[in-house]
Amino acid sequence: MYSRGVRGAITIEEDNAELLEKAAVELYSKIIEANDIKTEDISHIIFTLTKDIKCAFPAKFIRRNFKIQYVPLLCVNEMDIEPSLKKCLRILMVINTDKKQDEIKHIYLGAAKILRSDLVNEQL
């Protein structure tokens, strides 16, 4: 079994807790579905937010919507480099899996597709 990172990103239209919750749940769900991940296989998840998102912690929404109470979750600010994508939530999920690196499906949604356009065609 290997430790593998699964990446994903999504943007929101405005700094709003409801929009952030919807985006966090959508992104997390698609990562789980695309990679057939079971909660017990998740080592930890790091969420990063651009500095223009201050309304809430995305980890709160994942805990509220999924049975994931024993998985360590961490929220941090993304580096503020110009120019960069605004109002962006990113996820780095570290999982234990037998999949090879090229079998992992990274999920980039909405405006965040520009972050890894080389991977967008590999998505579901």
Image (tube, rainbow, N blue to C red):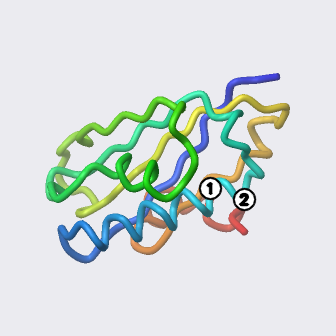
Whether pointer 1 and pointer 2 mark residues with C-beta atoms closer than 8 Å, the reply is yes
Residue 86 sits above or below residue 103 on the image: below
Determine the secondary structure under disc 1. Answer: helix
Secondary structure found at label 2: helix
- Please report the residue visible at 55 percent of the width from the left and 42 percent of the height from the top: 68
Q: Is residue 32 left or right of residue 1?
A: left
Question: Where does the N terminus fall, quadrant-wise?
Answer: top right
Residue 6 horizontal/vertical position (percent): 60, 42
Rendering quarter of residue 118:
bottom right
Residue in the image at 27% along x and 37% along y: 76
Q: 35 and 105: which one is in front?
A: 35
The kind of residue on which mark 2 rests is Ala
**Relative image position of residue 23 (x, y in whole percent):** 41, 67
- Image position, residue 84 (x, y; %): 25, 56
Q: The residue under label 1 is which amino acid type?
A: Ile
At a point 51% along the width and 38% down the height, the residue shown is 69
Tell me the quarter of the picture where residue 31 sits: bottom right
Residue 13 left/right relative to 67: left
Tell me the residue that label 2 is attached to. 34
Q: Which residue is mark 1?
A: 31
Horizontal and vertical percent for residue 29? Answer: 59, 61
Tell which of 38 and 123 is nearer to you: 38
- Decide: is 97 above or below 2: below
Name the residue nearer the viewer: 75 or 113. Answer: 75
106 lies left or right of 41: left
